[in-house]
C-alpha cells in the first residue's frame, strides 16, 4: 500500500509494510498532524489511539523510515543513526532526499493520506 506524505510544498510517497499496524494506520487516514522535533533526526506525535504493535530493535534507522514507538507514538525519521530502541515498522519513503530540508529543525505539520 502506498501513502503520500506532504510537508509544506514537498510531497513524498511511501510504501507501507504488510502488517496489522500499517493496516490500522491506513484506516485513520487522511490525517494532518503537528509533529514534534526530537534529537535532530526525527519528528514524532502521540496519537490519541493505540495501534497494534510488533516491536523489534532495527539496530539502525534509515532516513525516511516511518515507525511506531510503543503503541501510539508515530515517528518519521529524517536522518539515519544506530539505535537500541524497539519500534514497530510501518513503512518507508521511496526517495528521502529533501526530507530533512522539508521537515526543518522545528516542529512540522505533516499530512498522511492514501495515494490515489
Image (cartoon, rainbow, N blue to C red):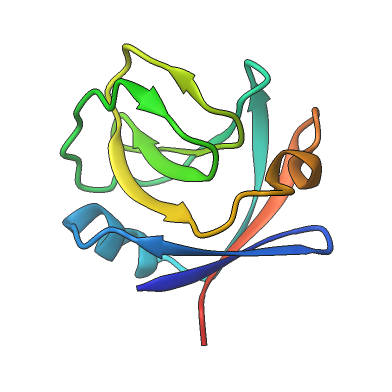
Q: Residue 29: horizontal and vertical position, in percent?
A: 47, 69
Query: Residue at (84%, 64%) from the top-left corner?
Result: 9
Quadrant into which the N terminus falls: bottom left
Question: Which of the pair 108/83 is nearer the observer?
Answer: 83
Q: Is residue 29 above or below residue 37?
A: below
Q: Quadrant of residue 89?
A: top left
The furthest residue to the bottom = 116
Q: Is residue 79 left or right of residue 52?
A: right
Q: Is residue 104 above or below residue 57?
A: below
Q: Is residue 110 left or right of residue 83?
A: right
Q: Quadrant of residue 101?
A: top right
Query: Residue at (63%, 15%) from the top-left corner?
Result: 39
Q: Residue 107: horizontal and vertical position, in percent?
A: 75, 34
Q: Is residue 31 left or right of residue 25?
A: right
Question: Which of the pair 92/26 is nearer the observer?
Answer: 92
Mark count = 0
Q: Residue 113: horizontal and vertical position, in percent?
A: 54, 71
Query: Residue at (32%, 11%) from the top-left corner?
Result: 84
Question: Which of the pair 60/112 is nearer the observer?
Answer: 60
Query: Residue at (80%, 29%) from the top-left corner?
Result: 106
Q: Residue 28: horizontal and vertical position, in percent?
A: 41, 65
Amino acid at each position: 500500500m502506498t501513502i503520500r506524505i506532504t510537508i509544506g510544498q514537498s510531497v513524498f510517497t511511501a510504501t507501507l509494510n504488510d502488517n496489522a499496524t500499517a493496516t490500522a494506520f491506513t484506516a485513520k487516514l487522511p490525517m494532518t498532524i503537528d509533529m514534534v522535533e526530537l534529537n535532530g533526526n526525527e519528528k514524532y506525535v502521540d496519537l490519541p489511539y493505540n495501534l497494534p504493535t510488533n516491536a523489534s530493535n532495527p539496530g539502525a534507522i534509515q532516513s525516511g523510515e516511518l515507525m511506531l514507538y510503543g503503541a501510539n507514538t508515530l515517528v518519521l525519521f529524517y536522518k539515519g543513526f544506530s539505535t537500541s530502541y524497539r519500534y514497530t515498522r510501518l513503512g518507508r519513503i521511496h526517495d528521502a532526499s529533501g526530507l530533512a530540508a522539508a521537515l526543518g529543525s522545528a516542529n512540522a505539520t505533516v499530512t498522511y493520506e492514501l495515494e490515489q
